[in-house]
């Protein structure tokens, strides 16, 4: 092994081809040594992914290198020929992406896809290659490597697909692994497994890892060193402990303080009023057998009970497939439950026909996960915000007046009603979605992963906004999330779901400190950065930490 | 974000209109202008029979010669453009409107979907020409009956297109948001679903228009279309085929104009499709 670091980027500057002098990346320098993990942290638009692409020689043609150099294990990337870069890509550097479903070819088996890498880059025989592929699948702890060899991507779970991606990136034992948000699309428990896998492989193969993430929790768990980026500029870089303990830049401090901690917020006082939403015995099963097919039945919700009082927040926490979104959709009556009651105010909406729902609809509103798809891209946002009001008979002028107030209430200029969704950032769009949900003065708001798609800093702002609005208007909030940390910060009660069943229910302090169910414990264990108290720039104190911090 | 970046790697940044598209547009524009100004552009009455000047070659008086009845081919061509374009455009609009309506209903209301789509499958199983002949036989040959006869076989394809777009978008969060805001079904269809179908339908319209002009020519050719008192490119070819060996241009000229017109429409349709399809959009790039 040479003394050259796995990756050295020096004074890299990137700009738009033919564009102005504005730089997309301004003078970035970093080094990833052998068996070292460097985390590249920043919000979207900071240039994290661009750095990865530049290193892989995959820069879009519209992006121009304005200066600097990148070398992987001593070989320069930026001035290498196309063929040279192709050779380097598999043998010296591998890359894994955020969404393994789209990064893998859906019509080719996993084995054949990994085999292709070997076929192109080595001259081994078919038998040797198959042995190598099985070996690498085994080394990424793929359950049943032989089965996976012949499986198509859709037959594997998200975590297994990511393992397959890692296997493909590592089959030629590269010196450098670039991981671009590899766990963002995964459940926390799977995320934890993948992170520890990357750690393992790194020490075993002694490779450098450039890990791109927006999650400081992940950083605390795996990084050796950290580079913080913002708008293409390096804000700060250093050893992970130094960044976490004594961040020098304001931006880093802001980033750290925005990380939701597992320490629950102070409980709000119990409200005496009757429940705004009461769900009892809710059941929903998918996949009834049809005329020609007999599909497997999936129980998405079995006997779910809960109630939410005005001004209080109930969090439903679970991983994908736990049925939490099904519950939300049943409450919204976007789905018709098979059995059970959903009582809003004093009306049971579970069994009502669509025509009778009109009156109740205005009392329950929904904020969606994806702010890019929850607003009609072809309509000015004013149209979206006033839609509900005009549906219930308000005159257009009056509705616009009210929409303007609502926009100001959620922190946007009132005159932005005429603009289209694409003119707003993700956080702003989520504010618009909240304004739309508020337009009908609902008594219940269901927030389905409403902040999961946002950067941490924006996430915190939107959560604060929701809390203010709730306090002011006495709204009952049903907060659905996969992130126990966010739930701890937002909720008065937490309900943990697994495979359609409620496994745990209680106040956040109880659920987080003395979880009764093994699954809840597993979730808490898996929460990234759980041992670090970001807001205090210190580790969480071992015993009794939660109760101390709460006081 | 990453996807947009990666997709722009393989695409050239310069967007320009190909010369072929410009040529096709110019040609089509000329045909449209001539059709509008037919009475002034034509040099003769297209139906004036002059046995004395049968099958004359091109001359200063008869720009493209005369046919077997002594009618001026140029003037018939000019008036033929009117009939052909009228039939093409009106049947395209009719097919799109009917198909859009049925497609939106099928896509949004599952209860009628099953039934209506089987009717559409039935319609698709019958060759368009055959169906058109049957309609014309039933109602007699007039411009309106020919238009209806041509439009109906095109409807199922439009229905499928509109329906598929509705099925793909009806579970988008912004549509579900509209449901939770109490928006009535028809308004959701009109405000949130219908606009998504327009790009593909506009493209489809250009194809229908071209194929309607072809179908009209076929109907005229086999004698099921408009009578020769209304000059169309189709019945000019039909009338001329008996004299093809004596004077080939009598068939070739209307056939050439017909082909050029249809080809232009298809080329323009392809271009519109490319421009409306964001996946084929050139040069666009966002940096994240």
Image (cartoon, coloured by chain):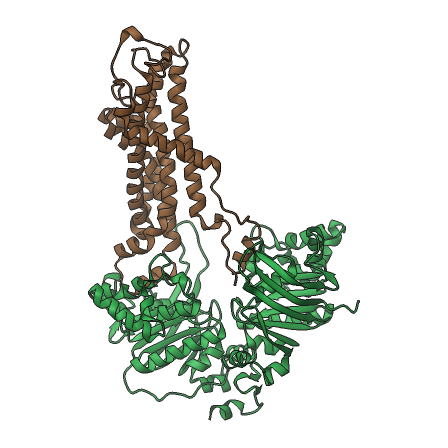
Left or right for A8, reference B42: right
Residue B53 point in image, percent of width and height: 30, 8
Left or right for A193, reference A289: right
Q: Nearer the viewer, residue B266 or A539?
A: B266
The residue at the far top in this view is B52
Q: Identify the hue of chain B.
A: brown
Q: Residue at x 31, y 49 (%)?
A: B104
Q: Nearer the viewer, residue A519 or B76?
A: B76
Residue A341 point in image, percent of width and height: 31, 72
Regarding residue B126, the answer to whether it shows in the image is no
Q: Can you tell which quarter of the image residue A362 is in?
A: bottom left
Residue A217 point in image, percent of width and height: 56, 77
Q: Nearer the viewer, residue B122 or A5?
A: A5
Q: Can you tell which quarter of the image residue B161 is in?
A: top left
Count of labels in the image? 0
Regarding residue B229, the answer to whether it shows in the image is yes
Look at the picture and state if B69 lies above or below A129. Answer: above
Look at the picture and state if B8 lies above or below B127. Answer: below
Look at the picture and state if B162 lies above or below A174. Answer: above
Look at the picture and state if A35 lies above or below B123. Answer: below
Residue B63 point in image, percent of width and height: 35, 17
Q: Residue at x 51, y 56 (%)?
A: B285
Q: Nearer the viewer, residue A531 or B18?
A: B18
Q: Identify the hue of chain A.
A: green
Q: Can you tell which quarter of the image residue B160 is in?
A: top left
């Amino acid at each position: 092994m040479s003394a050259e670091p796995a990756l050295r980027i020096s004074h890299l500057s990137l700009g738009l081809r033919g564009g102005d002098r504005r730089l997309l990346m301004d003078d970035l320098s970093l080094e990833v040594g052998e068996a070292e993990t460097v985390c590249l942290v920043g919000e979207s638009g900071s240039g994290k992914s661009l750095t990865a692409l530049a290193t892989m020689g995959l820069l879009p043609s519209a992006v121009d290198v304005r200066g600097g150099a990148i070398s992987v294990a001593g070989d320069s990337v930026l001035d290498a020929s196309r063929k040279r870069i192709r050779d380097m890509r598999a043998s010296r550097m591998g890359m894994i992406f955020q969404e393994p479903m789209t990064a893998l070819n859906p019509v080719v088996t996993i084995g054949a896809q990994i085999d292709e890498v070997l076929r192109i880059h080595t001259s081994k025989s078919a038998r040797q290659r198959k042995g190598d592929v099985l070996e690498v699948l085994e080394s990424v702890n793929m359950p049943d490597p032989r089965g996976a060899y012949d499986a198509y991507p859709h037959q594997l779970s998200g975590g297994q697909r990511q393992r397959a991606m890692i296997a493909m990136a590592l089959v030629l034992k590269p010196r450098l692994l670039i991981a671009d948000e590899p766990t963002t699309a995964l459940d926390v428990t799977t995320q934890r497994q993948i992170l520890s896998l990357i750690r393992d492989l790194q020490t075993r193969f002694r490779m450098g890892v450039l890990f791109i993430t927006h999650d400081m929790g992940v950083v605390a768990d795996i990084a050796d060193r950290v580079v913080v980026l913002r708008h293409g500029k390096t804000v700060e870089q250093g050893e992970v402990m130094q960044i976490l303990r004594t961040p020098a830049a304001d931006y880093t401090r802001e980033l750290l303080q925005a990380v939701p901690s597992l320490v629950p917020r102070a409980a709000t006082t119990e409200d005496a009023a009757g429940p705004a939403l009461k769900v009892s015995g809710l059941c929903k099963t998918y996949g009834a057998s049809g005329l020609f097919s007999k599909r497997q039945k999936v129980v998405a919700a079995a006997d779910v009970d809960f109630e939410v009082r005005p001004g209080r927040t109930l969090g439903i926490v679970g991983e994908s497939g736990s049925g939490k979104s099904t519950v939300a959709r049943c409450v919204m009556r976007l789905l018709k439950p098979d059995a059970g009651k959903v009582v809003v105010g004093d009306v049971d909406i579970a069994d009502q026909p669509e025509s009778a729902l009109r009156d109740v609809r205005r009392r329950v509103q929904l904020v969606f996960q994806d702010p890019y798809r929850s607003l009609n891209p072809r309509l000015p946002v004013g149209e979206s915000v006033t839609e509900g009001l005009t549906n219930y008979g308000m005159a257009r002028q009056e509705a616009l007046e009210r929409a303007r107030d609502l926009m100001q209430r959620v922190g946007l200029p009132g005159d932005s009603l005429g603009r289209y969704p694409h003119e707003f950032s993700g956080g702003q769009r989520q504010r618009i979605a909240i304004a739309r949900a508020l337009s009908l003065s609902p008594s219940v708001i269901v927030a389905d992963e409403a902040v999961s798609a946002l950067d941490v800093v924006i996430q915190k702002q939107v959560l604060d906004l929701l809390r203010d609005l709730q306090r002011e208007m006495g709204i009952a909030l049903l907060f659905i999330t996969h992130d126990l940390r966010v739930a701890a910060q937002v909720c008065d009660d937490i309900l943990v779901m697994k495979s359609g069943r409620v496994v745990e229910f209680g106040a956040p302090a109880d659920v987080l400190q003395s979880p009764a169910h093994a699954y809840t414990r597993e979730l808490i264990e898996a929460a990234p950065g759980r041992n670090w108290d970001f807001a205090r720039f210190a580790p969480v104190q071992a015993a009794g930490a939660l109760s101390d911090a709460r006081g | 974000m990453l996807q947009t970046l990666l997709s722009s790697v393989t695409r050239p940044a310069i967007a320009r209109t190909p010369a072929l598209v410009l040529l096709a547009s110019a040609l089509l524009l000329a045909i449209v202008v001539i059709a509008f100004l037919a009475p002034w552009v034509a040099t003769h009455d297209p139906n004036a029979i002059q046995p004395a000047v049968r099958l004359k070659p091109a001359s200063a008086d008869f720009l493209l010669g005369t046919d077997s009845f002594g009618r001026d081919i140029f003037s018939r061509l000019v008036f033929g453009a009117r009939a052909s374009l009228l039939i093409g455009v009106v049947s395209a609009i009719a097919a799109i409107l009917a198909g859009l309506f049925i497609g939106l209903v099928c896509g949004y209301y599952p209860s009628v979907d099953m039934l209506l789509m089987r009717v559409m499958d039935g319609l698709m199983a019958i060759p368009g020409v055959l169906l058109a002949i049957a309609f014309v036989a039933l109602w007699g040959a007039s411009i309106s009956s020919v238009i209806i006869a041509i439009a109906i076989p095109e409807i199922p394809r439009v229905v499928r297109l509109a329906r598929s777009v509705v099925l793909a978008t009806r579970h988008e969060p912004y549509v579900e948001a509209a449901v939770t805001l109490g928006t009535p079904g028809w308004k959701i269809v009109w405000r949130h679903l219908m606009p998504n179908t327009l790009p593909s339908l506009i493209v489809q319209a250009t194809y229908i228009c071209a194929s309607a002009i072809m179908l009209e020519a076929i109907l005229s050719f086999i004698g099921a279309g408009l009578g020769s008192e209304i000059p169309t490119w189709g019945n000019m070819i039909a009338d001329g085929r008996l004299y093809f060996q004596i004077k080939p241009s009598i068939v070739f000229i209307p056939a050439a104009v017909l082909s050029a017109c249809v080809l232009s429409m298809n080329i323009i349709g392809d271009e519109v499709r490319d421009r409306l399809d964001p996946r084929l959009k050139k040069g666009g790039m966002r940096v994240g």
